[in-house]
Structure formats: C-alpha cells, structure tokens
Image: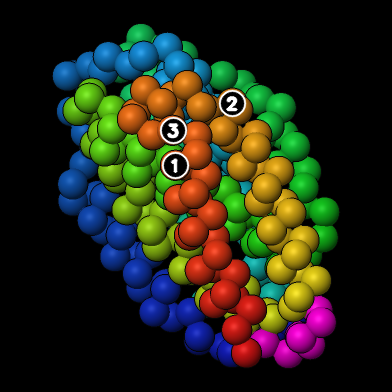
Amino acid sequence: MTTVDTGAFTAWLRDFEGAALLRRTWGDPDWSAGARLEPALVRSLQRFQVGEDGDGARLLDKARRAGDPVYAEAVRLFVAEEREHARLLGRLLESAGAATISGHWTDAAFVRLRRLLGLRTELMVLMLAEVVALGYYRAVRDGVPDLLAAEVAGRILADELRHVPFHRDRLRRSFRESSRLSRAIASALWWSLLAGVLTVVVIGHGDALRGAGMSRTAFAREVTGCFRGVVAEVMAR
C-alpha cells in the first residue's frame, strides 16, 4: 500500500470546507425563473447527472485505508460536492420540465472500470471524468443562452477546477517511488483510456456541445490539452 505524508492534504481539507461554507452562504439559484433547454442538452445533462450521483462508498473506503485521515476527510467532502452537483443538475432539469434518468450504460461501465483495483487506479479513471467535466461545463456556462443553465454550470465548474489538482496531488504522491518504466507504462495506458472516454463523449454529447457553440474537435482538443498537463505533473520526478 502506498502511503502519503500525514497532513499533506490539510490545505485541501480547508479548501473543501471553505467551499462548503460558500455554498451555504450563496444558497440555491433562483429555480423559479425556469429554464429553456434544447432537447440535445437535456439528454446530455441527464447523463451527466447520473454520473455525478454516486454515493462514493468504494472511493471513501479506499481513501480511509490509505492511512491519512486528513486525506480521507477531504475525499468525503469531495464526494459530497459531487452529490451536490447531481442535485443541482436534477433541479435544473426539473426547471426545464424534464426528468432525471435512473441510469445509463456509459456511467455503469465507468463505475465498473473505476472499481477494478486500488485507490490509485480509481483516481486515474476518475481523473478522466474530471478533465472531461472541465471542458463540458465550461462549454455550457459560456455557450448556452439559458441563464439558469449557465449559472448551474458555472457553479459546478468552480468545483471541478479544484477537483483536478486535488486528485493530481494525490496521484503525484502515489507515483513518487515508481520507476521510469512504470511511469511510462502507466502514462500510455492512461492516454489509451482517455482516447476511449473522449470517443464516447464526443459521440454521445456532440449535439449538445455543438448547441453550446463548441465543435467535437474543439472539445477534444481542450480536454486533451488539460489532460496532457495533468499527466506531466503526475509523472514528474
């Protein structure tokens, strides 16, 4: 089992606690304003809502067994933020007169993949979702004309901008003692997984992205650029 320095994630814990306080201060968006969303965006948001709506029990258990209670508590707050995203997306869909869905095959496959091995593997797979989310919610925030949808996407994006470096820091520590060859193999596999995830996303959500003014190519380029920086930092010696 790879361990981390006790207390290395104290700053992250305080960051998550501060974000929770801000959410309580802000309160909810004005749902009474309603939302007018294109059908393609509704279908896309329904799938993202399912992806955000997990209980995180497996991840929490692995985080607790990693040996750092501060990190485990930060992960608990991370999971709470993801569930808050699911709630916000559910309320947005409701405001648009649309229902949530109970599940989708892409989310089921993603969850199974995450749970295959230990904490490091789960975080590497989870990072794929986080970098995709950065591009997706930025596109919705900046390109969808509905003000309520833009506000919800902006709130979620603000959290995702913290989630990526949070997981990056843990992964970087987990690879600290790995050999150059191990890092190279892990990087190659990680890039292969991203290629598969991006293919699924641009096919399944391409119409919604286009409605937000972003082509499939531009989206893939943005996600790839973000991911390249993550891999470089995680695998740096």
Query: What span is in magenta?
Result: 176-182
Q: Return the residue at label 2.
A: 204
Q: Return the residue at label 3.
A: 215
Q: Position of residue 161 (x, y in %)?
A: 38, 58
Secondary structure beneath disc 3? loop
Residue in the image at 51% along x and 68% along y: 229
Q: Return the residue at label 1.
A: 218
Question: Type of residue at label 3?
Answer: Ser
Question: Type of residue at label 1?
Answer: Ala
The answer to whether mark 3 and mark 2 are in CB contact below 8 A is: no
Residue in the image at 43% along x and 80% along y: 10
- Quarter of the rendering containing residue 224: bottom right
Image quarter of the C terminus: bottom right
Residue in the image at 71% along x and 27% along y: 105
- Quarter of the rendering containing residue 68: bottom right
Residue in the image at 52% along x and 27% along y: 205
Instruction: Note whether 211 is above or below 27 in the view shown.
Output: above
**How many dots with numbers?**
3
Q: Position of residue 111 (x, y in %)?
A: 71, 43
Disc 3: CA contacts within 10 A as few (<14), some (14-19) or many (>=20):
some
Secondary structure beneath disc 2? helix
Instruction: Note whether 224 is above or below 140 in the view shown.
Output: below
